Image (cartoon, helix red, strand yellow):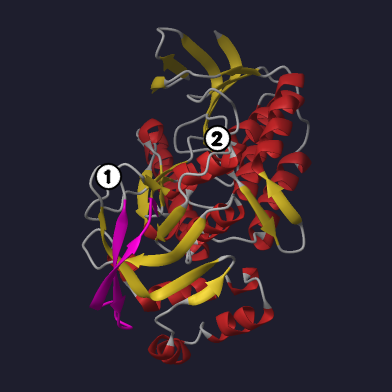
Amino acid sequence: MISDVVVIGAGPAGLSAAVAAAEAGASVVVIDENPRPGGKLLGQLHEEPGTGWWIGAEISKSLAKRAEEAGVRILSNRQVWNLSPKWEVALDNGESVCGEYAVVATGAAERPLPIPGWSLPGVMAIGAAQTLTNYYRVRPGDRVAVVGMDPLSLTVAHELSMAGADVVGIYLPSKSVFAGSQADPDRNLEYLAGMSDLAPNALLRWGGRLASNRALRNLALTFFPTSGIPLMGTKLNLRKSIVSIGGDERVQHVEIATIDKHGNPGKTRTVDVDCVCISGGLYPVQELTRDCELVRIDQLGGTVPLYSPEMETSQSNLFVAGNVTGIEGAKIAMAQGTLAGTAIASRLGRIQGKDAVDQAAEAVRSARKSSAITFMPDIDEGRRIAEDLWLQLEREKSMTQKDESYA
């Protein structure tokens, strides 16, 4: 099978790239391992300040419809086994798809956060709970404890509460080599302060802004109630951590420790639950970008490919978009996908001039400025590092070409 563009991943970034290229007249094939296009969009359901409800299932349906109307061929339930230069994609059924251009939009995966007892039935990653609740309309438990504090865990805890679950609280993980700074109350309060504009009432928003000051954070942690503070149908517990998960054949209870402002445990008690949702954060998936120039930038969530302002990697005609470039929200992933698809369409001669590409690049910047949720607290610094490294790579490439021309 041959097309102008092959896109790997049918999430928000991949579908947006396919739509942008196909609507400009390119032939596009999208490959995805799931039975339905949409990726992580399918499980997203939350209310955003000033813009109302974000219903991912409807957005993914709209994107898929636009793609199909533009002539995009979507191959669902297909696994990619290999991506070879020029660009040939080997599939699990022995078929292959070739494209002059390729877009890797494989997104992110959840980082495991081991806790004693985490292998019991009823323990799941926070993303699985989100998909069960919002996509399959199945409540994962009646009495739920959430471990880990980040935008995803806060959002899903609220969604579980709206679905009728008794969310007993959102807790920190206990100190361990795996939890790292996720078990640090100060780090979590600083992180939450960065999301104060999303708080459900004025008092919490005001308190969140004050918590951006280190001295005030230290004071706040000292007097933070060990009983937690109410938040969207549950309780936020910066002074409690989940030490272990227990039960005979499935989850029946968790052991919770009261901790000091440094995360050190004190007294413990047992709380009955039938489900535990663990949020260890996300990391970019890079199996298919292994031949690109890759760097580890913790502010972006882990290892990421370097790429140009038009989303092209160090491998000619190979583009990236979405969380494979760093952990951000769906709106930014969609804007990046549109930029990649528009840039490819321009290269193919389907779009004349640079105005469309420039507008798509500006849309990415605008999406970042208006983003209601920031998954990585130092994402701006991470992007600056990545941009500087790309410029350095381009300078080295230019010097090498000059040296070869003189030889």
Residue 384 showing in the rendered view: no
Three-letter code for the amino acid on which mark 2 is drawn: Gly
Quadrant occupied by the C terminus: top left
In the drawing, does residue 110 fall left or right of residue 63? Answer: left
What percent of the width, then of the height, locates residue 65?
A: 73, 25
Out of 132 and 360, give the one closest to the viewer: 132
Residue at left offset 37%, top offset 76%: 185
- In magenta, the rendered stretch is 252-277
Q: Which residue is mark 1?
A: 120
Q: Marks 2 and 1, Cα distance to the nearest angstrom?
A: 27 Å
Q: Is residue 33 above or below residue 388?
A: above
- Whichever of labels 2 and 1 marks the residue nearer the N terminus, that label is 2
Q: Is residue 248 above or below residue 5?
A: below
- Quarter occupied by residue 119: top left
Out of 114 and 116, give the one closest to the viewer: 116
Q: Main secondary structure of the magenta part?
A: strand
What percent of the width, then of the height, locates residue 357?
A: 71, 41
**In what element is the residue under mark 2?**
helix
What percent of the width, then of the height, locates residue 187?
A: 39, 74
Residue 394 showing in the rendered view: yes
Residue at left offset 27%, top offset 44%: 120
In the drawing, does residue 98 fall left or right of residue 304? Answer: right
- Quarter occupied by residue 194: bottom right
Residue 275 drawn in magenta: yes
What percent of the width, then of the height, locates residue 383?
A: 50, 58
Residue 363 drawn in magenta: no
Q: Which residue is mark 2?
A: 39
Quadrant occupied by the N terminus: top right
Name the front one of labels 2 and 1: 1
* Mark 2 surroundings: few (<14), some (14-19) or many (≥20) residues within 10 A: many
In the drawing, does residue 367 fall left or right of residue 154? Answer: right
